[in-house]
Amino acid sequence: MKVTILGSGTNIHPTRAAAGYVVETDRPILLDFGPRTLSNLLQTGIDRHTIQYLLFTHYHADHFSDFIPFFFDAVCHSKFAAVRPDLTIYGPPGTKRLFRTIFQTFPNFSNPPFRVILKEVKDRPFLIGHTQITPLPMTHSDQQICLGYRLEFQSRSAAFSGDAMASPNLMTLCQDTDLAVLDCSFSSHQPGGSHMHAEECGKVAEKANVKKLVLSHFYEAADRSNVVAQARRFFSGPVIKGKDLLTLQVGRGFPR
């Protein structure tokens, strides 16, 4: 299992793309698709036209907006080059309504040359190939359900909190994982609402017995702070400050 961070920042971060990750098991799986993550995906060497599975944690713009150019490109490619495989989109309740509205509203999005399957998930595991995926609702926004995802493949496991505050479901999601990528929007010196700060990330990782902690989803203020040191006050394992295009082999050493 290999994880590449496509975006480790937020909507208008000056140097980081917003939220996005690609997980490679027996096939590539894209998890969130925030602004500027598509250009980073192009740098990974993964053929975007072979990606068949998208997972969305929720639909705040910093986790979603690069889907629009991705899909437009997929339609154009399929019409004028070669038809891509089917595309399956997983997300929280409301996913079907949102995407059907997009497909009906955006020019050239309706009736694509490939099949699009929309699946709403909440708390039941499902399979993509040989990868088991467990979604769980996180504590983030009163307006919509935000999911975290746990992916397990060949005895390796990785958890992605999406946007989240500390909660029992987050603990369950991360329990005994090889890798946990957690929402570290804030420095412990400047905490904010609806997201975790670095010390909270460390506490979750320690209590959940995570093997390796990756901090991500930085606002600018958090980026200027020593969030790694703050997380290490409470977590005894390795702590990595995420960055765009960082690749991690899950269950092995430190990133390259």
Image (cartoon, helix red, strand yellow):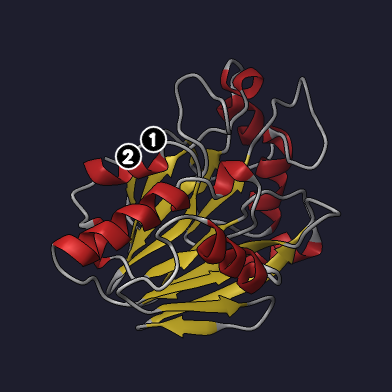
Q: Amino acid at mark 1?
A: Asp
Please say if 196 is above or below 137. Answer: above
* SS state under label 2: helix
Name the image quarter holding the N terminus. bottom left
- Of 123 and 43, nearer the camera is 43
Please say if 5 is above or below 210. Answer: above
- Residue furthest to the left in view is 81
**Residue under numbered circle 1:** 244
* SS state under label 1: loop
Name the image quarter holding the C terminus. top left
Q: Quadrant of residue 40?
A: top left
Asked whether, in this view, residue 125 is left or right of residue 233, the answer is left
Residue 88 lies, in percent from the top left, at: 43, 75
Q: Amino acid at mark 2?
A: Asn
Name the residue: 65% across, 28% down.
230
- Residues packed near mark 1 inside 10 Å, few (<14), some (14 to 19) or many (20 plus): many
Q: Which mark is residue 40?
A: 2
Asked whether, in this view, residue 76 is left or right of residue 34, the answer is left
Asked whether, in this view, residue 163 is left or right of residue 211, the answer is right
- Residue furthest to the top in view is 224
- Residue 196 in sight in this render: yes
Q: Say whether marks 1 and 2 touch (CB < 8 Å).
A: yes
How far is the residue under mark 1 from the one under mark 2? 8 Å
Residue 117 lies, in percent from the top left, at: 47, 79
Please say if 64 is above or below 173. Answer: above
Name the residue: 49% across, 37% down.
8
Residue 151 lies, in percent from the top left, at: 48, 70
- Of 20 and 70, nearer the camera is 70
Name the residue: 58% across, 33% down.
10
Name the residue: 31% across, 46% down.
41
Asked whether, in this view, residue 44 is left or right of residue 186, the answer is left
Residue 15 lies, in percent from the top left, at: 45, 21
